[in-house]
C-alpha cells in the first residue's frame, strides 16, 4: 500500500505528489536482508502547461543550430556564455498561475521563491543563470534558469527493472515509459549529493528522500515527486 503525501495548500491543478511507502521515514531501506539501498525520487515537472518563448533567441543562439538554450552537453552541465541576458515570454494556460518550477528543455525555469529554497536545500548541486521574463499582469516573474549539476552512475541494475540500450558511442542508456520501471539506487554511488542526474538517464532529475521531503515542505509548485522504484 502506498500513501500520497501532498504539499500544503495544494489543489488538483497545482501540487507536488509523492508516491512512497513507509520506507520514506528513513533515507535507507533494506532489501530482505541484502545490502542497503537508497530510497530516491524522480522530480518530474508538469508538462504542457505553459507556453514559453525565448524572445532574443537570434541574438543568443546565432552560432548554434539549437532553437533553445541548452547545456554544453547532456552530461556536461551548467550554462554557456551568452552575449545578453536571456529574455522569455511565459504564459500559463487554462487560467492557472505560473508554477514555481517550469520545464524548459534540459533546464528548469524557476521563481525567486524556488531559487531561494532550492539553494538552501540542494546547495552546490544546483546552479542558476539570471534571466528576464515577460508574464501576464499579476503573475510572479520567473527570473532564473536552474540546472542540476551532478551526473552519477548510481543505478543498481541487478535489482532494477529498466529498459537498457546503447548510444552511438556505446554509452549505456536507460528509458522510462516503455514498461513499468523500477530504479534502485546504490547509496555508495550517490556520494554526498542530494539531487542528481543519472549518466544513463541525463535528462531526468532524481533526489534523495530528505530532499524530496524538504521540497514538499517548501511548497514548491510544478513538480510531481515519484518513488523511483514505482515508475
Image (cartoon, rainbow, N blue to C red):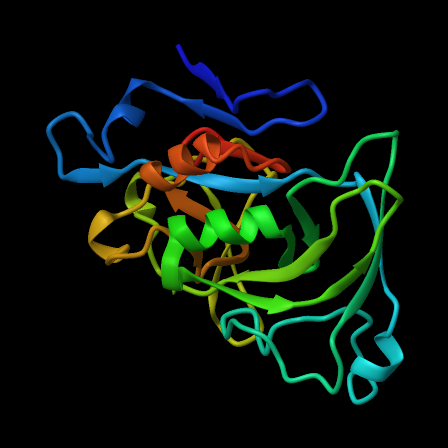
Q: Position of residue 19 (x, y in %)?
A: 46, 23
Q: Looking at this rendering, what residue extends furthest in the left direction?
A: 33
Q: How many marks?
A: 0
Is 142 left or right of 42, judged from the image as shown? right
Name the residue rendered at 59%, 78% in the picture.
72
Quarter occupied by residue 190: bottom left
Q: Position of residue 58 (x, y in %)?
A: 88, 80
Residue at left offset 44%, top offset 31%: 217
Of the pair 219 and 31, the residue shown nearer to us? 219
Q: Is residue 152 visible?
A: no
Decide: is 126 above or below 113.
Answer: below
Residue found at x 88% / y 45%? 136
Residue shown at 83%/87% (left/top)? 62
The picture quadrant where one finds residue 221 is top right
- Above or below residue 83? Residue 148 is above
Please, is residue 206 above or below residue 28 in the view?
A: below
Can I make out residue 143 in this image? yes
* Residue 120 horizontal/vertical position (percent): 40, 51
Is residue 15 toward the left or the right of residue 89 in the image?
left
Horizontal and vertical percent position of residue 34: 13, 34
Q: Residue at the far top: name it.
A: 1
Amino acid at each position: 500500500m502506498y500513501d500520497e503525501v501532498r504539499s500544503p495548500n495544494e489543489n488538483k491543478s497545482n501540487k507536488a505528489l509523492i508516491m512512497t511507502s513507509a520506507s520514506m521515514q528513513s533515507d535507507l531501506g533494506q532489501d530482505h536482508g541484502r545490502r542497503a539501498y537508497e530510497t530516491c525520487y524522480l522530480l518530474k515537472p508538469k508538462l504542457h502547461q505553459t507556453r514559453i518563448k525565448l524572445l532574443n533567441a537570434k541574438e543568443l543562439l546565432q552560432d548554434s543550430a539549437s532553437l533553445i538554450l541548452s547545456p554544453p552537453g547532456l552530461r556536461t552541465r551548467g550554462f554557456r556564455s551568452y552575449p545578453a541576458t536571456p529574455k522569455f515570454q511565459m504564459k500559463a494556460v487554462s487560467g492557472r498561475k505560473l508554477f514555481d518550477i517550469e520545464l524548459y528543455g534540459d533546464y528548469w525555469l524557476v521563481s525567486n521563491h524556488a531559487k531561494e529554497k532550492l539553494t538552501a536545500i540542494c546547495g552546490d548541486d544546483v546552479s542558476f543563470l539570471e534571466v528576464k521574463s515577460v508574464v501576464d499582469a499579476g503573475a510572479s516573474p520567473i527570473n532564473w534558469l536552474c540546472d542540476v549539476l551532478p551526473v552519477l552512475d548510481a543505478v543498481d541494475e541487478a535489482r532494477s527493472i529498466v529498459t537498457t540500450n546503447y548510444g552511438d558511442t556505446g554509452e549505456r542508456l536507460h528509458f522510462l515509459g516503455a514498461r513499468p520501471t523500477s530504479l534502485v539506487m546504490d547509496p555508495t554511488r550517490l556520494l554526498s549529493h542530494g539531487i542528481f542526474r543519472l549518466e544513463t538517464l541525463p535528462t531526468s532529475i532524481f533526489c534523495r528522500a530528505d530532499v524530496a521531503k524538504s521540497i514538499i515542505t517548501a511548497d514548491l509548485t510544478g513538480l510531481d515527486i515519484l518513488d523511483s522504484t514505482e515508475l
